[in-house]
Amino acid sequence: MTHTTPAAPPPAGPTTFASRDPATGRVLADHPVHGPDDVADAVRRSREAAGRWAALPAAERRSALLTWKRELAARLDAVAATVAAETGKPRADAELELLLTLVHLDWAARHAGRLLRRRRVRSGWLAANQSATLVHRPLGVIGVIGPWNYPVYTPMGSIGYALAAGNGVVFKPSEYTPATGAALAEAFDAAVPESAGLLTVVTGAGPTGEALARSGVDKVAFTGSPGTARRVMAVCAESLTPLLAECGGKDAVIVAADADLDAAADAVVWGAMGNAGQTCAGVERVYAVREIHEELCRRIVERARDLRPGAGSDASYGPMTMPGQAEVVRRHITEALAAGAEALWGGTDSVAGNVVAPVVLTGVPEDCPALTEETFGPVVVVNAVTDVDEAVRLADASRYALGAAVFCGSRRTGAALAARLRAGAVSVNSVLGFAAVPALPFGGSGDSGFGRVHGAEGLLSFTAPQSVTVRRFAAPVDLTSFRTPAAAKARAVALVRGLHRRR
Ligand code: NAD
């Protein structure tokens, strides 16, 4: 008889993790690492609250969400301070992010009732004896997995709209911004105590997110990199859990010969360098027609050299939030220069620790990582093109298709150029103009993901349509009965066929 020693239980993982100030590395706070049991518990609590929430009249949900909005507005200073501490972004940037969030939450709260309520649709003459209605019902509980770069605005595009559509939400914020996530749920519970638990936050890194994707939630709304989206999608595939994926971008700006070059340069520098370039729909590529390329570059450099990155209160933008990102940025610059690009401002020396000074490159070959991969740093490539047709072709050649912008003397030509682009959102004569319009859906295709947040489409993303017919009277020829004579069915077929052959 052989004796086997029982296998030792697997070593328990850490039960807490630290969030840090990106500028100094100083620990800000410790947060729990939530495992599958904690996540299951959060989903259960949210589901219980969601049953009551979905049963409320739409007007009551609207009123509760507007109370939450007012609570967030009241707490704006404190939440912005948390965002700034966890991401390293300047306080003013955090405040702007919160303002945009309030505008979106307000819109979702006020429009959900009208957009999702039951409405009649035409039955058509073949089913004239039926009355037909369509309603958009909540899905249940939505698992929201968020990034750190806009830790309020981005996940709230899912959280606010999912709640407005009548769902519960379990939110896993990025491990870099856990306190920001917790602040959203605390404000909700304070504002709407009768629905406490409807919005629940779980904290931790990838494994906590994976547990949420596996937890039996009714949909996962993920925002992050395309690599992680693929892993989340593989987990969702096991249980056919639907997924909304908001991923990265490599946004292009097209500058036509008759564009206002000051406006274009201003917008390019803000769109490329703001938030240290860590914006999913930030400007990473500029295609300027040859006649104005040199002058545009001059004006871009003139503005970029005035920026002051760092941690001070007067900084234009902060350090890189993720310690490893500075190396990605350095590699993109190094490989572009090795391939023959010219640095008009800055270069590899601009990467100093986790603070990256602005870099403006030109003449970058299209197959360089600086043009094919998301750089996510304060680096912009400004390449010359023969005409706007070439600009459209190159802008669309990326595997990302999130946002884009066009600068053009004529608004009408600008809009026509916008319509030729694959991007999910395009601004003419501004950058990121769409971000502040809550009625506009946001999202991309390709490696930028799929599905939409914001606007009516954003509300619909968190619902399932239910179609209902109610028979009003017996049809002259009942096509759904075995008892209808074959001759009557044949006459009906001949009639419908005849009609469709003529029209
Ligand atoms: P990330 O992919 O590293 O992480 C995103 C989230 O996924 C985090 O909460 C993380 O903990 C979690 N996660 C990691 N592994 C997981 C796993 N296996 N299963 C489940 N969850 C997991 O992205 P990030 O660095 O936090 O964010 C930056 C990226 O997000 C960039 O690519 C940026 O472009 C993108 N982004 C997109 C949008 C948009 O709306 N399209 C908005 C903001 C950021």
Image (cartoon, rainbow, N blue to C red):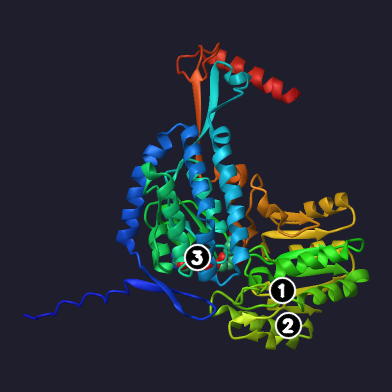
Dot 3, how many residues are within 10 Å of its Cα: few (below 14), some (14-19), or many (20+)?
many
Examine the rendered structure and indicate whether residue 324 appears above or below residue 457. below
The structure residue drawn at horizontal position 53% and vertical position 31%, both measured from the top left corner, is 117
Residue 247 lies, in percent from the top left, at: 58, 62
Residue 62 lies, in percent from the top left, at: 51, 38
Quadrant of image for the C terminus: top right
Pointer 3: what residue?
82
Quadrant of image for the N terminus: bottom left
Which mark is first along the chain, 2 or 3?
A: 3
Residue at the limit of the structure toward the left, as seen here: 1
Residues tagged 2 and 1 counted as in contact (Cβ below 8 A):
yes
Q: Is residue 117 left or right of residue 253?
A: left
Q: Dot 1 lies on which element?
A: helix
Q: CA distance from mark 3 to mark 2?
A: 36 Å
Dot 2, how many residues are within 10 Å of its Cα: few (below 14), some (14-19), or many (20+)?
many
Examine the rendered structure and indicate whether residue 130 appears above or below residue 395. above
Pointer 2: what residue?
336
Q: Amino acid at mark 3?
A: Thr
Pointer 1: what residue?
371
Dot 1, how many residues are within 10 Å of its Cα: few (below 14), some (14-19), or many (20+)?
many
The structure residue drawn at horizontal position 45% and vertical position 31%, both measured from the top left corner, is 57
Q: Is residue 218 visible?
A: no
Q: Amino acid at mark 2?
A: Ala
Front residue (pair 427, 384): 427
Residue 122 lies, in percent from the top left, at: 61, 23
